[in-house]
Amino acid sequence: MAKWGEGDPRWIVEERPDATNVNNWHWTEKNATPWSKERLHQLFVDFKIAQSDIECIVEAVDKCSGEATVNNRKGKLIFFYEWELVLKWSGRLLNNSKLSHKGKLTIPNLSEENSLEDVEITVTIDESNDESETLKQFMYNVGRDSIRKQLGVYIKELKEEYSKNLILPKKGADGSDATAALTQDANNAKNAAQKAASVTASVTASSKASSNPTGVGCKLDVRTLSMTEEFHCNANDLYNALTKPDMLTAFTRAPAKVDAVRGGEFVLYGGNVLGKFEELVPEKRIQQSWRLKNWSSGHYSNVVIELEETSSSTMMTLKQTGIPASEYDAMRTNWHRYYWHSIKQTFGFGSSISDAL
């Protein structure tokens, strides 16, 4: 035990003129959240992505939720940031400038735990047609890398600029020691920034390497599927079968996670089928971003289901765009087997009352 007036120097906070964090022993923190939100808006609003005869623009940051802090502990800089972003974008084919198509880019996992290559970016469109699907593929193949480049700029600036003067010179240090401390601070930030920049450069190089003369990058070969099916029930019953958790659980024979609201997510068949509801019109229309678990990361097809009730049945029309070509044949078979046939078998929607009599 130390005598009165003495003490273990490891536990003594020395006095200094500014009365702050001598020897950088204590945990100090800067809140970078307000700055980050402003900077992310600056980086993305009106950000243009163009190539050949395609032009897309990020029009607005629809959602920017999360936080960012920069910390110093024992002279070591530690960065924490976690963001969920939703960007609104529009695009057009320059050879048909009168038509503009809109969509969203969703970034759910921008954090220090994920490298830029691992940041998930989901591309969706508001309405599906041949032109909008071309733009969606462009944003998937080329636009995502441009977005990652902007995210890299944010990370670089956070580490390089926002950490300045977080590490302070020690008490009693002469001019050379103080300069050395500040130099070390700058070097730490510079090294972190260079690491972020190198990741950005690799992403950009990957983007350039994957581009081809058509201007749409390494284009994923996709197909469009259309089918019509008759169900002997009213439109409301069929709509419920496709949106109600208990009915989906019944015909898929597996627990179903379903949030049937605009922007709500669904997970079916043990996680093998997943996506998001883009539009819901009760008894009339269901639009989804839809994918299989084993598809390329971030790639979603667009599914539009339209219901038309007749005097004795309901006609269901499905159009699915953006199906990977290798999955096309199996997709048609599986819609029939695991959706339409199973619904009819489970709920008795396959035969009319007159047929049963």
Image (cartoon, rainbow, N blue to C red):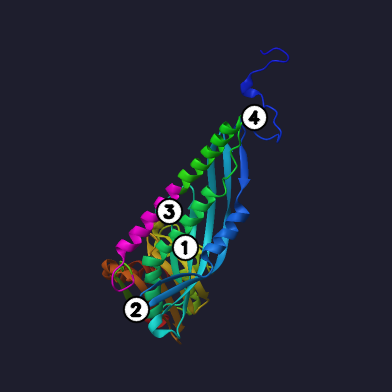
Local SS, label 1: strand
Badge 4: few (under 14), some or many (20 or more) residues near its Cα, within 10 Å? some
214 inside magenta stretch: yes
- Give the mark nearer the N terminus: 2 vs 3: 3
- Give the mark nearer the N terminus: 2 vs 1: 2
Residue kind at label 2, given as amino acid type: Met
Badge 2: few (under 14), some or many (20 or more) residues near its Cα, within 10 Å? few
Residue 272 x, y percent position in the rendering: 37, 58
Instruction: Measure the alpha-carbon separation of dots 2 and 1.
Output: 22 Å
**In the image, which residues are magenta?**
194-216
Position of 114 relative to 101 (above/below): above
Residue kind at label 3, given as amino acid type: Leu
Residue kind at label 4, given as amino acid type: Lys
Toward the bottom, the furthest residue is: 311
- Number of marks in picture: 4
Local SS, label 4: loop
Residue kind at label 1, given as amino acid type: Phe
Residue 242 x, y percent position in the rendering: 46, 70
Position of 286 relative to 199 (above/below): below
Q: Nearer the viewer, residue 256 or 145?
A: 145
Task: Specify the label residue 266 is tagged with.
Answer: 1
Q: Quadrant of residue 96?
A: bottom left
| Nearer to us: label 1 or label 4 | 4
Instruction: Measure the alpha-carbon separation of dots 3 and 1.
Output: 26 Å
- Give the mark nearer the N terminus: 3 vs 4: 3
Q: Which residue is mark 4?
A: 171
Q: Which residue is mark 2?
A: 227
| Nearer to us: label 2 or label 4 | 4
Q: Assign the magenta stretch its main secondary structure.
A: helix
Q: Which residue is mark 3?
A: 116
